[in-house]
Image (cartoon, helix red, strand yellow):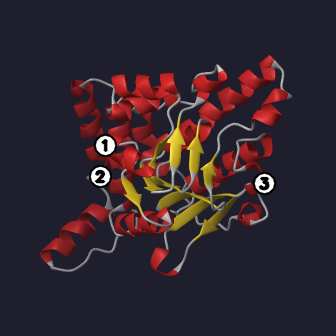
Protein backbone atom coordinates (compact mmCIF):
# COMPACT_ATOMS: atom_id res chain seq x y z
CA UNK A 1 0.00 0.00 0.00
CA UNK A 2 1.22 3.53 -0.77
CA UNK A 3 2.23 5.33 2.39
CA UNK A 4 4.06 8.49 3.35
CA UNK A 5 7.10 6.32 4.00
CA UNK A 6 7.47 6.35 0.22
CA UNK A 7 8.43 10.01 0.46
CA UNK A 8 11.48 9.39 2.61
CA UNK A 9 12.88 6.96 0.05
CA UNK A 10 11.67 8.69 -3.08
CA UNK A 11 14.94 10.26 -4.14
CA UNK A 12 16.77 6.98 -3.63
CA UNK A 13 14.85 4.70 -5.98
CA UNK A 14 18.07 3.43 -7.53
CA UNK A 15 17.23 4.70 -11.01
CA UNK A 16 19.65 3.43 -13.58
CA UNK A 17 20.00 3.40 -17.37
CA UNK A 18 18.90 0.12 -18.91
CA UNK A 19 19.04 -2.01 -21.96
CA UNK A 20 15.79 -3.92 -21.86
CA UNK A 21 17.29 -7.33 -22.77
CA UNK A 22 14.79 -10.05 -23.68
CA UNK A 23 11.86 -7.80 -22.79
CA UNK A 24 12.58 -5.83 -25.97
CA UNK A 25 11.88 -8.90 -28.15
CA UNK A 26 8.89 -8.06 -30.41
CA UNK A 27 7.98 -11.76 -30.46
CA UNK A 28 6.95 -11.53 -26.81
CA UNK A 29 3.32 -11.16 -25.80
CA UNK A 30 4.42 -8.01 -23.96
CA UNK A 31 7.55 -6.13 -24.98
CA UNK A 32 9.25 -2.85 -24.16
CA UNK A 33 10.25 -0.26 -26.74
CA UNK A 34 12.34 2.74 -25.75
CA UNK A 35 11.74 5.57 -28.23
CA UNK A 36 14.39 7.91 -29.60
CA UNK A 37 14.61 11.20 -31.47
CA UNK A 38 11.84 13.66 -30.62
CA UNK A 39 10.19 10.98 -28.45
CA UNK A 40 13.28 10.22 -26.37
CA UNK A 41 12.32 9.60 -22.76
CA UNK A 42 9.09 7.82 -23.71
CA UNK A 43 8.92 4.04 -23.30
CA UNK A 44 6.17 1.91 -24.80
CA UNK A 45 4.90 -1.21 -23.10
CA UNK A 46 3.49 -3.00 -26.13
CA UNK A 47 0.64 -5.49 -25.75
CA UNK A 48 1.21 -8.10 -28.43
CA UNK A 49 -1.07 -11.14 -28.28
CA UNK A 50 -3.14 -10.65 -31.45
CA UNK A 51 -4.35 -14.24 -31.77
CA UNK A 52 -6.04 -13.90 -28.36
CA UNK A 53 -6.97 -10.21 -28.68
CA UNK A 54 -4.50 -9.27 -25.95
CA UNK A 55 -6.46 -11.25 -23.39
CA UNK A 56 -4.91 -11.54 -19.95
CA UNK A 57 -3.37 -15.00 -19.89
CA UNK A 58 -0.62 -16.41 -17.67
CA UNK A 59 2.30 -15.80 -20.05
CA UNK A 60 1.00 -12.36 -20.97
CA UNK A 61 0.74 -11.31 -17.32
CA UNK A 62 4.14 -12.73 -16.37
CA UNK A 63 5.77 -10.70 -19.12
CA UNK A 64 3.67 -7.66 -18.19
CA UNK A 65 4.90 -7.81 -14.58
CA UNK A 66 8.50 -8.06 -15.77
CA UNK A 67 7.99 -5.02 -18.01
CA UNK A 68 6.63 -2.97 -15.10
CA UNK A 69 9.65 -3.82 -12.97
CA UNK A 70 12.04 -2.90 -15.79
CA UNK A 71 10.63 0.57 -16.46
CA UNK A 72 10.12 1.35 -12.78
CA UNK A 73 13.84 1.76 -12.16
CA UNK A 74 14.91 2.99 -15.59
CA UNK A 75 16.44 6.48 -15.47
CA UNK A 76 15.84 6.91 -19.21
CA UNK A 77 12.08 6.42 -18.93
CA UNK A 78 10.23 9.64 -18.13
CA UNK A 79 6.82 8.65 -19.55
CA UNK A 80 5.27 5.20 -20.09
CA UNK A 81 2.63 4.48 -22.73
CA UNK A 82 0.61 1.27 -22.82
CA UNK A 83 0.15 0.54 -26.51
CA UNK A 84 -1.55 -2.31 -28.34
CA UNK A 85 0.13 -3.88 -31.37
CA UNK A 86 -3.27 -5.26 -32.43
CA UNK A 87 -5.29 -3.08 -34.79
CA UNK A 88 -8.76 -3.76 -33.38
CA UNK A 89 -8.23 -4.24 -29.66
CA UNK A 90 -6.44 -2.65 -26.71
CA UNK A 91 -7.15 -5.52 -24.33
CA UNK A 92 -10.17 -7.83 -24.40
CA UNK A 93 -9.93 -8.69 -20.71
CA UNK A 94 -9.62 -12.12 -19.15
CA UNK A 95 -8.63 -15.14 -21.21
CA UNK A 96 -11.87 -16.98 -20.44
CA UNK A 97 -10.78 -20.18 -22.20
CA UNK A 98 -7.70 -20.34 -20.00
CA UNK A 99 -9.74 -19.32 -16.96
CA UNK A 100 -12.12 -22.23 -17.58
CA UNK A 101 -9.25 -24.68 -17.03
CA UNK A 102 -8.42 -23.19 -13.60
CA UNK A 103 -9.70 -24.44 -10.29
CA UNK A 104 -11.56 -21.96 -8.09
CA UNK A 105 -8.42 -21.52 -6.01
CA UNK A 106 -6.26 -20.93 -9.10
CA UNK A 107 -8.77 -18.46 -10.54
CA UNK A 108 -8.87 -16.50 -7.29
CA UNK A 109 -5.08 -16.37 -7.12
CA UNK A 110 -4.87 -15.24 -10.74
CA UNK A 111 -7.40 -12.43 -10.29
CA UNK A 112 -5.60 -11.30 -7.13
CA UNK A 113 -2.44 -11.16 -9.22
CA UNK A 114 -4.18 -9.03 -11.85
CA UNK A 115 -5.33 -6.60 -9.16
CA UNK A 116 -1.80 -6.34 -7.76
CA UNK A 117 -0.26 -5.85 -11.21
CA UNK A 118 -2.67 -3.08 -12.15
CA UNK A 119 -1.95 -1.40 -8.82
CA UNK A 120 1.75 -1.63 -9.68
CA UNK A 121 0.99 0.28 -12.89
CA UNK A 122 -0.80 2.94 -10.85
CA UNK A 123 2.21 3.18 -8.52
CA UNK A 124 4.88 3.54 -11.19
CA UNK A 125 6.77 6.77 -10.45
CA UNK A 126 6.47 7.87 -14.09
CA UNK A 127 3.24 9.12 -15.66
CA UNK A 128 1.49 6.28 -17.52
CA UNK A 129 -0.73 6.88 -20.56
CA UNK A 130 -3.12 4.27 -21.98
CA UNK A 131 -3.51 4.46 -25.76
CA UNK A 132 -6.85 2.76 -26.41
CA UNK A 133 -7.75 1.74 -29.95
CA UNK A 134 -10.49 -0.86 -30.36
CA UNK A 135 -11.89 -2.96 -27.52
CA UNK A 136 -11.03 -2.42 -23.85
CA UNK A 137 -13.43 -4.71 -22.04
CA UNK A 138 -13.51 -6.04 -18.49
CA UNK A 139 -9.94 -6.40 -17.33
CA UNK A 140 -8.82 -4.42 -20.38
CA UNK A 141 -10.66 -1.34 -19.15
CA UNK A 142 -9.50 -2.04 -15.60
CA UNK A 143 -5.93 -1.91 -16.90
CA UNK A 144 -6.58 1.43 -18.58
CA UNK A 145 -8.24 2.84 -15.45
CA UNK A 146 -5.01 2.19 -13.52
CA UNK A 147 -3.17 4.61 -15.82
CA UNK A 148 -2.81 8.34 -15.17
CA UNK A 149 -4.08 9.50 -18.56
CA UNK A 150 -6.24 7.74 -21.15
CA UNK A 151 -6.50 8.52 -24.86
CA UNK A 152 -9.06 6.66 -26.99
CA UNK A 153 -9.92 6.54 -30.65
CA UNK A 154 -13.46 7.07 -31.91
CA UNK A 155 -13.42 3.34 -32.74
CA UNK A 156 -12.75 2.34 -29.14
CA UNK A 157 -15.32 0.22 -27.33
CA UNK A 158 -15.08 0.12 -23.55
CA UNK A 159 -16.99 -1.39 -20.68
CA UNK A 160 -16.82 -3.26 -17.41
CA UNK A 161 -18.88 -6.18 -18.67
CA UNK A 162 -18.27 -8.71 -15.90
CA UNK A 163 -21.88 -8.84 -14.64
CA UNK A 164 -22.86 -10.22 -18.06
CA UNK A 165 -20.92 -13.35 -17.07
CA UNK A 166 -22.14 -13.39 -13.43
CA UNK A 167 -18.91 -11.81 -12.16
CA UNK A 168 -17.90 -8.39 -10.84
CA UNK A 169 -14.87 -6.30 -11.82
CA UNK A 170 -12.13 -7.92 -9.76
CA UNK A 171 -8.95 -6.12 -10.81
CA UNK A 172 -9.73 -2.69 -9.39
CA UNK A 173 -12.48 -1.57 -11.75
CA UNK A 174 -15.25 -1.37 -9.16
CA UNK A 175 -13.08 1.00 -7.11
CA UNK A 176 -11.36 3.11 -9.78
CA UNK A 177 -14.34 3.76 -12.06
CA UNK A 178 -16.48 5.54 -9.44
CA UNK A 179 -13.53 7.74 -8.51
CA UNK A 180 -13.55 8.96 -12.11
CA UNK A 181 -17.23 9.12 -13.11
CA UNK A 182 -18.97 9.23 -9.72
CA UNK A 183 -20.73 6.53 -7.73
CA UNK A 184 -24.14 6.61 -9.43
CA UNK A 185 -22.79 6.46 -12.99
CA UNK A 186 -20.29 3.75 -12.10
CA UNK A 187 -23.09 1.65 -10.63
CA UNK A 188 -25.16 2.02 -13.80
CA UNK A 189 -22.25 1.10 -16.08
CA UNK A 190 -21.28 -1.93 -14.00
CA UNK A 191 -24.81 -3.20 -13.27
CA UNK A 192 -25.81 -3.03 -16.96
CA UNK A 193 -22.42 -4.15 -18.39
CA UNK A 194 -22.81 -1.29 -20.87
CA UNK A 195 -20.30 -0.99 -23.71
CA UNK A 196 -19.66 2.59 -24.81
CA UNK A 197 -17.57 4.27 -27.50
CA UNK A 198 -14.66 6.68 -27.30
CA UNK A 199 -16.76 9.83 -27.56
CA UNK A 200 -19.04 8.69 -24.75
CA UNK A 201 -15.99 7.78 -22.68
CA UNK A 202 -14.63 11.30 -23.17
CA UNK A 203 -17.97 12.84 -22.19
CA UNK A 204 -18.10 10.72 -19.03
CA UNK A 205 -14.50 11.52 -18.16
CA UNK A 206 -13.37 7.89 -18.52
CA UNK A 207 -10.79 9.08 -21.06
CA UNK A 208 -9.01 12.43 -21.28
CA UNK A 209 -9.18 12.63 -25.06
CA UNK A 210 -11.03 10.94 -27.94
CA UNK A 211 -9.35 11.29 -31.33
CA UNK A 212 -9.90 10.24 -34.91
CA UNK A 213 -7.37 7.66 -36.08
CA UNK A 214 -4.56 6.18 -34.00
CA UNK A 215 -4.59 7.40 -30.37
CA UNK A 216 -0.86 6.70 -30.07
CA UNK A 217 -0.06 9.98 -31.84
CA UNK A 218 -2.02 11.98 -29.26
CA UNK A 219 -0.47 9.92 -26.47
CA UNK A 220 3.01 10.70 -27.79
CA UNK A 221 2.09 14.37 -28.07
CA UNK A 222 1.12 14.43 -24.38
CA UNK A 223 4.30 12.54 -23.51
CA UNK A 224 6.42 15.10 -25.35
CA UNK A 225 4.78 17.87 -23.31
CA UNK A 226 5.69 16.07 -20.07
CA UNK A 227 9.32 15.28 -20.97
CA UNK A 228 10.69 18.87 -20.62
CA UNK A 229 9.16 19.30 -17.15
CA UNK A 230 11.15 18.63 -14.01
CA UNK A 231 11.17 14.82 -13.69
CA UNK A 232 11.33 14.76 -9.90
CA UNK A 233 8.54 17.34 -9.73
CA UNK A 234 6.34 15.31 -12.09
CA UNK A 235 6.87 12.13 -10.08
CA UNK A 236 6.15 13.87 -6.79
CA UNK A 237 3.08 15.56 -8.25
CA UNK A 238 1.79 12.11 -9.21
CA UNK A 239 2.55 10.80 -5.73
CA UNK A 240 0.85 13.78 -4.06
CA UNK A 241 -2.30 13.34 -6.15
CA UNK A 242 -2.42 9.56 -5.74
CA UNK A 243 -1.92 9.67 -1.98
CA UNK A 244 -4.04 12.76 -1.43
CA UNK A 245 -7.01 11.37 -3.33
CA UNK A 246 -7.18 8.45 -0.89
CA UNK A 247 -7.72 10.57 2.21
CA UNK A 248 -9.42 13.66 3.68
CA UNK A 249 -8.40 17.18 2.66
CA UNK A 250 -6.43 17.90 5.85
CA UNK A 251 -4.32 14.77 5.46
CA UNK A 252 -4.02 15.43 1.73
CA UNK A 253 -2.57 18.89 2.36
CA UNK A 254 -0.02 17.28 4.66
CA UNK A 255 0.90 14.91 1.84
CA UNK A 256 1.35 17.88 -0.49
CA UNK A 257 3.54 19.63 2.08
CA UNK A 258 5.80 16.60 2.45
CA UNK A 259 6.06 16.10 -1.30
CA UNK A 260 6.92 19.78 -1.76
CA UNK A 261 9.63 19.46 0.90
CA UNK A 262 11.31 16.79 -1.23
CA UNK A 263 11.71 19.32 -4.06
CA UNK A 264 13.39 22.11 -2.10
CA UNK A 265 16.89 20.65 -2.05
CA UNK A 266 16.98 19.40 -5.66
CA UNK A 267 19.36 20.75 -8.29
CA UNK A 268 16.43 20.82 -10.71
CA UNK A 269 14.65 23.42 -8.57
CA UNK A 270 17.72 25.68 -8.68
CA UNK A 271 17.97 25.13 -12.44
CA UNK A 272 14.34 26.15 -12.85
CA UNK A 273 14.86 29.38 -10.94
CA UNK A 274 18.06 30.14 -12.88
CA UNK A 275 16.38 29.49 -16.22
CA UNK A 276 13.50 31.79 -15.30
CA UNK A 277 15.88 34.59 -14.29
CA UNK A 278 18.00 34.13 -17.42
CA UNK A 279 14.97 33.89 -19.73
CA UNK A 280 15.98 30.51 -21.17
CA UNK A 281 14.57 27.00 -21.25
CA UNK A 282 15.57 24.90 -18.24
CA UNK A 283 17.62 21.74 -18.65
CA UNK A 284 16.60 19.28 -15.97
CA UNK A 285 18.64 16.22 -15.01
CA UNK A 286 16.38 14.63 -12.43
CA UNK A 287 18.73 15.54 -9.58
- Residue 92's label in the rendered image is none
Q: Nearer the viewer, mark 1 or mark 3?
A: 3
Using the numbered discs, state the Cα–Cα distance from disc 1 to disc 2 in whole angstroms. 7 Å
Q: Quadrant of the C terminus?
A: bottom left
Reply above or below: 92 against 277.
above
- The residue nearer to you, when weighing 51 against 21, is 51
Q: Residues within 10 Å of mark 3 (few under 14, many from 20)?
A: few
Provide the secondary structure element on which disc 1 rests: helix
- The residue nearer to you, when weighing 146 against 253, is 146
**Residue 261 image position (x, y, % from top left):** 27, 45
Residue at 83% over, 26% down? 102
**Residue 212 image position (x, y, % from top left):** 43, 65
For marks 1 and 3, the one nearer the N-term is 3
Q: Residue 171 appears in which quarter of the rendering?
A: top right
Left or right relative to 171: residue 110: right
Q: Are marks 1 and 2 in contact (CB under 8 Å)?
A: yes
Dot 3 corresponds to which residue?
Answer: 51
Q: Does residue 132 show up?
A: yes
Q: Residues within 10 Å of mark 1 (few under 14, many from 20)?
A: many
Using the numbered discs, state the Cα–Cα distance from disc 1 to disc 3 in whole angstroms. 44 Å
Q: Which of marks 2 and 3 is in front?
A: 3
Left or right relative to 192: residue 34: right
Dot 1 corresponds to which residue?
Answer: 259
**Residue 90 image position (x, y, % from top left):** 60, 52
Question: Furthest-right residue in view?
Answer: 101
Q: Residue 285 appears in which quarter of the rendering?
A: bottom left
Dot 2 corresponds to which residue?
Answer: 263
Q: Residue 179 appears in which quarter of the rendering?
A: top left
For marks 2 and 3, the one nearer the N-term is 3
Left or right relative to 235: residue 113: right
Using the numbered discs, state the Cα–Cα distance from disc 2 to disc 3 in whole angstroms. 46 Å
Amino acid sequence: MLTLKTLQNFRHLGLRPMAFSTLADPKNEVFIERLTGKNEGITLINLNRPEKKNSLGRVFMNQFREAIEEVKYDAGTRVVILNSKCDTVFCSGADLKERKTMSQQEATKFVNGLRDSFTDIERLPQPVIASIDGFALGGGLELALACDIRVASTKAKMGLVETKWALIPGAGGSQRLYRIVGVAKAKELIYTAEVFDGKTAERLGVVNHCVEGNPLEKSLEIGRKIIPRGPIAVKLAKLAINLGSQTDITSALSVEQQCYAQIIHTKDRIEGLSAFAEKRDPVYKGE
